[in-house]
Amino acid sequence: MHLPDYKEAKKRNKSNVEEEKYELNDNLINIGLNKKYHIKTYGCQMNEHDTENIKAMLEQIGFTECEDQEKADLVILNTCSIRENAHNKAFGMLGRLKHQKEEINKNLIIGLCGCMAQEEKVVNDIMKKYKYVNFVFGTHNIHRLPYILNEAFKTKKQVIEVYSKEGNIIEGIPAKRANKYKAYVNIMYGCDKFCTYCIVPFTRGKQRSRESIDIIKEVNKLIKEGYQEVTLLGQNVNAYGKDFDYNYRMENLLEDVAKTNIPRIRFMTSHPWDFTDKMIDVIAKYDNIMPSIHLPVQSGSNKILKLMGRKYTKESYLELFDKIKTKIPRVTVSTDIIVGFPGETEEDFQETLDLVNYCKYDNAFTFIYSERDGTPACRLKEVIPMDVREDRLQRLNEVVNKYFLENNNKLLGEVLPVLVEGISDKKNIYYGYSDTNKLVNFTSDKELEFGDIVNVLITEIHTWSIDGRVK
Ligand code: 5AD
Ligand code: SF4
């Protein structure tokens, strides 16, 4: 039994990260034969992509996917720890699964993985209070799933296998991708930033960058399979390569991926601290790197940014923001903002509003600060009452929404390139995203192929989407 341990997870050592190949033992090939699985995924794109890996591994060992959770023989929850409500959702679902096991299928196998599996407290609770959960595995040992399942089947005991130390990068894990035209490609794992509110450096471990040769190989394979877009994924992609002992960074990777000629490249998430001028130049130079940047600011107050351990000031953020806006034609910028961080006064919050009024973001994900056990911010004394946090969120949302609409209004009459992703059944209307990451609903006189990139004339504006017709 391997249990999570925060002290171990917090350690950052210099030991080299090696590359290992995913291998499946022949004797596991049929353990899921005639059994159906269902996975529920919470949280970020990293988790979504992990789910794609989990699905492919399950299908390698004989399982088939099943849409209806109640008909499944195996249900896995791929969980998120970032805020308390993500926790609550997963625990709520565990309650429903208990009922399903008692009332519908007593042989139901229940598994839990993802970031919550890396939390000491969660795993302790599962061992004590959720004995009906058959297995738990962490974010560092996804590749072990077939073996863990096998053990759970054989021993009929609760199997807990969570590594706190990251270990190596595992190459060659198969993926059953959710989308035929857009693919997630991991470029790095973990995060070394330790923003004081954030649980990720504990649940995802130290930063480990994938070798560019493996990334390019994956992108080339995706191109052959007909993919039009890749999103390069990492908790802090701008720090890509900082853990290598040679000089190859995000700007080099972006350029090499651009040279594969895949039509669309996106990347997320960026930390303002590591965003270099060279990166901006590369993004501006290549047409296939999309002019849409996610640049989380978190707060507009220098005092709060310092308490958050963000390592930049409002002034240096704005300098970077201006550079991005002037150097990358047509660029759109989105952000993440937290309100109600300990010590945030009304004046600090006003500074956040001022910053939003300056940046006029195209999109913003806004959050109420949520205490995460074990993070440094939990020890801060000046806790903001929940009603104040809620009030600030509402006021912030009013301001950000105003700019979504204002920015979209400027697009009226413009022609945007849109990747055709699907058609909504009811209205015969296609949908997809523009290069600038706007959701576009549009009509066409001719029938369109999904996966094509078409020019759409924008004819109507809403806050969260825009409408148009193919030109
Ligand atoms: N409370 C609220 N929001 C958080 N985020 C990360 N940790 C917390 C927390 N403890 C937000 C940040 C981050 C996004 C992914 O989630 O804004 O950028
Ligand atoms: Fe969390 Fe900060 Fe790392 Fe992002 S950069 S994952 S907010 S610690």
Image (cartoon, grey):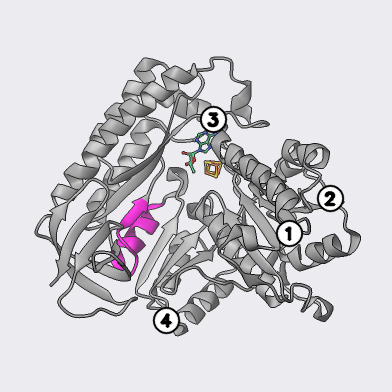
Residue labelled with disc 1:
141
Q: Quadrant of residue 25?
A: bottom right
Work out how far the residue at label 1 is from the one at label 4, CA to CA, in angstroms.
30 Å
Query: Is the residue under label 4 in contact with that under label 1 (CB below 8 Å)?
Result: no
Query: Is the residue under label 3 in contact with that under label 1 (CB below 8 Å)?
Result: no
Disc 2 beta carbon < 8 A from ligand 2? no
Q: Residue at x 71, y 71 (%)?
A: 35
Work out how far the residue at label 3 is from the one at label 4, CA to CA, in angstroms.
41 Å
Work out how far the residue at label 1 is from the one at label 2, CA to CA, in angstroms.
11 Å
Residue labelled with disc 2:
2
Quadrant containing ligand 2? top right
Query: Is the residue under label 2 in contact with that under label 1 (CB below 8 Å)?
Result: yes
Query: Is the residue under label 3 in contact with that under label 2 (CB below 8 Å)?
Result: no
The residue furthest left is 413
The type of residue carrying mark 2 is His
Work out how far the residue at label 2 is from the one at label 4, CA to CA, in angstroms.
41 Å
Horizontal side of 447 relative to 214 (left or right) equals left
Residue labelled with disc 4:
226
Q: Residue at x 60, y 68 (%)?
A: 211
Q: Position of residue 233 (x, y in %)?
A: 50, 59
Q: Secondary structure at mark 1?
A: loop
Work out how far the residue at label 1 is from the one at label 3, CA to CA, in angstroms.
27 Å
Name above or below for residue 338 compared with residue 451: above
Q: Position of residue 201 (x, y in %)?
A: 63, 43
